[in-house]
Image (spheres, rainbow, N blue to C red):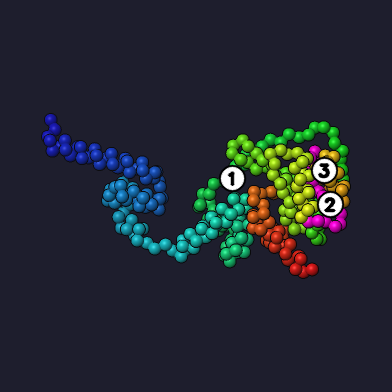
Amino acid sequence: MLTAKQIQELQKRNAQLEEENLILKKSECHIHAKLQVRLKAIYRLRFEHTTVMLCRVLHVNRSTYCNFINKRPSKREVENQRLRKLLLEIYMKAKKRIGTRAFKIILLRDYGVNISEGRILRLLKSMTLPKMSTIKPCFKSNKSPVFSSDNLLKQEFNPNSPNQVWTTDFTYISIGAKRHFYLCAILDLYLRKCIAWKVSDRIDAKLTCDTLEIAINKRKPKEPIIFHSDQGSQFKSASFRKLLDEHQLLASYSIQEVQLSCFEYIEQFYNNYNPHSANKGLTPNQKEENYFKKI
């Protein structure tokens, strides 16, 4: 028979074991967890359990934990935290549409911070930022026979001045899980600048014609311009080709479809914020301003 004192000791020990198991579950530390992980777990649970109990269960010396909570962050850690805030600000503006090279250019351009792409990549990984959805809608190809046309551009992607070559294509904008809208954009190939864009819920010839009319009204070309696109039926429709002829635009069609990098909020992001390697790190608007200043 157990005495009352022995029963009380067993109950006390049982409660202690239950608390230890609870700490192990809450801490989410496996048997080979690193010291820094265990220290952070103790700090997180310090108001729920005694420090003595936490240190004993997670096998951390109390003096080590005291040094951890009283330790001042190093200069490197302070600098990394400041850089994370800047990267997060850029990430929110760009909506996860740029890579480490663009991050590096924007940091130097807007904040005067010059760090390597490798460090930027490490900081971004430590922030565990969510990725954009890569699910794409299905496009149905037009199987009806259409005439072919020459490729006037012939892979010459570096014209000498604005309003020599315009290029266009469609991209999509996801709204929710299944809804998509379509964006038609026209770029000036010299500036890499989006000069016209329009959104519609239908990908048809009307969308291409409306977008081209916006570009013509904005730029008011006085000389013939090569208008380059893919072999899509919208760009070969009678209404679109009639509009090209009326404004002396020379139709040019690529052999393979080339998707343009069209973005949401083009006027705010693409033309004014996003650096282009073809522009030596300048935005399209900056390159345009520099060109006309020289004239």
Rate crowding at label 1 as few (under 14), some (14 to 19) or many (20 or more) other CA atoms within 10 Å. few
* Residue 39 at x, y percent in the picture: 37, 52
| Disc number placed over residue 226 in the picture, else none | 2
Q: Secondary structure at mark 1?
A: loop
* Residue for badge 1: 132
Q: Quadrant of residue 142?
A: top right
| Disc number placed over residue 240 in the picture, else none | 3
Rate crowding at label 3 as few (under 14), some (14 to 19) or many (20 or more) other CA atoms within 10 Å. some
Q: Residue at x 68, y 39 (%)?
A: 201
Q: Is residue 228 above or below residue 142?
A: below
Q: Is residue 94 magenta?
A: no
Q: Is residue 104 left or right of residue 81?
A: right
Q: Residue at x 32, y 51 (%)?
A: 46
* Residue 261 at x, y percent in the picture: 69, 49
- Residues rendered magenta in the picture: 219-234
Residue 140 visible to the viewer:
yes
The residue positioned farthest toward the front in the image shown? 217
Q: Residue at x 31, y 54 (%)?
A: 61
- Between disc 3 and disc 1, the foreground one is 3
